[in-house]
Image (cartoon, grey):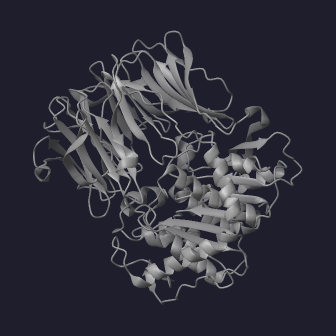
Amino acid sequence: MTDLSKPPVAALRPHRYSHHGISIDDPYSWLRDQKYPVIDDADVLAYLREENAYFEAAMAPHAALVDTLFAEMKGRLKEDDASVPQKEGDWLYWWAFKPGGQYRIWYRRPVAGGAESIVVDEPAEAADAEYFRLQVLAISPDGKLAAWSADTNGAERFVLKIRDLATGQDIETVSLVTNGLVAWGADSKSLVYTEVNDNWRTYRARLHILGSDAAGDPTLYEETEELGFNVGVGKTQDGQWIIIATGDNQTSEVRIVPAADPGAAPVMVSPRQTKREYSVDSAHGSLWILTNDDHVNFRVARADPADPGNWETVIAGSESVYIRGLTSFAGHLALTERVDGLDQVRLRAYDGQEHRVAFPEASYTAGLGGNPEYDPPAYRLHYASMVTPQTVFDYDPVARTLTTRKVQEIPSGFDPSLYATERLMVPARDGKTIPVSVLYRKGFSRDGSGKLFLYAYGAYGHAIPPGFSTVRLSMVDRGWAYAIAHIRGGDDLGYDWYLQGKAEARWNTFHDFSDAAKGLIAAGLTSAGNIAINGGSAGGELMGVVANTDSDLWGAVVADVPFVDVLNTMLDADLPLTPGEWPEWGNPITDKAAFELIRSYSPYDNVAAKAYPPMLITGGLNDPRVTYWEPAKWAARLRATKTDNELLLLKINMGAGHGGKSGRYDSLREDAEAYAFVLTQMGAG
């Protein structure tokens, strides 16, 4: 039986490295298996298992609370949930869960009428796997075949197969190491796909002809110039062109291939220019381009496919309107935008007439849903707010009406009138104003006595919208407030909001989060020590930084798959993601200023001999994005250095990757564990 008074202690093994004349001690370097991605070092595995045993022992007294929370969360999920059928060609497609099912079953039936059939049965495919994730399900233009890919261990190397939909049998295995979308040729006999190399970089696009030996598939494009670029494929909305794109977090380059002749030499749209991003769609014989070449919030341009690099502005960039996406349908350019941090959908006819879709609430998140066809009679949209469950609309652009096709059902019950939501604007230390979305039950005290759960991400220009979550209701219904801080590093207030938290401006992200917490304290929503915080991946890096800088503010910290060994990772060009991450964080190998900046905040490198709040840290053994040793090393150094007696737990999923466990109920149980940890550590369990 595990003795909770004796947490695991990782051995100290001297290791020192130097860059730019600075030497750094890294005594837990040994926790990285030197044979990675093979992980079989006996000492490493023994330590991880010891940590997992300690986690299980520490949580065992709270099993009843975990079960209660899990039952609540599960009770809010519709057991036999299903999507709204979507027309694609002569068929309607949808997914559904069976009661108790962890995974979806994908179905179709003829539009003209007839029996339904199964396209992919995820529960059957996942039956013998600890982990299962379906990435691609792409139907051929003639509707007879499906290209589908799945990962069965969390390592994000997907197996791509072709299925005959008449028999339900897989007829070919195309690749064992694919990642990303695929694009069918117009003849339904050819398929363009991407593969990863040994370093998990999506480096080439290949063409497969059905019936041929996949080992000999020709390469349409291979990225050889930029180590950090990744290759992706897609198809224009009108089906005329296959897109082959390459790029990193700040630079992109696109080639196009006729879908009618996918073996043709790809045509460059415009050569890469550092820090210029662009994407391409096609309609009415023109290319439609979204780019940030002359405005940080992007402009829309048109080009002739015969002269694809000659871009004519159609919609100029704007300080007030951030254009985030463009889809060129037959009737409209559909633009997903953000204005003052609020999602918008703008429809622009090709004669220049335009309007925005009117949504029913003042604060919400919305955007285009699945719209596979080029000329649909209505546009499928998704919508939610912090008090409105996920809603599917069909929008008639002529009548300008929204038809509700589905509202997320909460079987155990949900009464929105019991809840309130608000958007606060909180001052940052440098004079900027940070939006914070807050949800609580009506009657929540504003005298500072309340407990608050604060979430943020703050990287890669990824905004966290004020959407709906059934999971967070388990905290809110226990009297907590739940808040999302829309900090810099995300693009919540425009692309420049992202740039203000990136690379050399990275400290803004961390300061914004702490300042948001202080603003919520000033607003009477909580007090120091009554705030639980949570973030994952780059948001886990955020958790690590603010645990070091503002430990007195937090009552508990939950850091999921946290990117916390930042300096070591960014110094290792052989790791899968590192070169592609340099534009985001800086390259400390060649740039001393970047080295010093990353060193100044890297959570692992800044653990101090001080008191920390209770902490729950998670990781995945097969995670290619944030390798398992990052949370493991961080936890080890925290245990050896911190001066408090607060509980510190490390849980490593030994059969999963970046997203944790894959089944919908297994994932909920991990949420229940995290909430139980917070509630018990903060005296509310």
State which quarter of the image contains the C terminus: bottom right
Residue 378 location, quadrant: top left
In the image, taking residue 672 as reference, residue 240 lies left or right, namely: left
Which residue reaches farthest top? 399
Front-lying residue, 653 or 72: 72
Say if 35 sits above or below 508 in the image.
below
Front-lying residue, 15 or 12: 12
Residue 312 x/y as whole percent:
35, 25
Q: Can residue 310 be seen in this view?
A: yes
Say if 327 sits above or below 196 in the image.
above
Q: Residue at x 27, y 64 (%)?
A: 198
Residue 446 x/y as whole percent:
87, 47
Q: Is residue 255 visible?
A: no
Front-lying residue, 279 or 199: 199
In the image, taking residue 409 as reference, residue 437 lies left or right, namely: right
Front-lying residue, 89 or 339: 89
Q: Which residue is drawn at 53% across and 55% down?
A: 666
State which quarter of the image contains the N terminus: bottom right
Q: How many marks?
A: 0
Q: Which residue is drawn at 61% across and 33% down?
A: 409
Residue 147 x/y as whole percent:
27, 40
Q: Residue at x 37, y 46 (%)?
A: 135
In the image, taking residue 450 as reference, residue 155 lies left or right, namely: left
Residue 581 x/y as whole percent:
42, 58
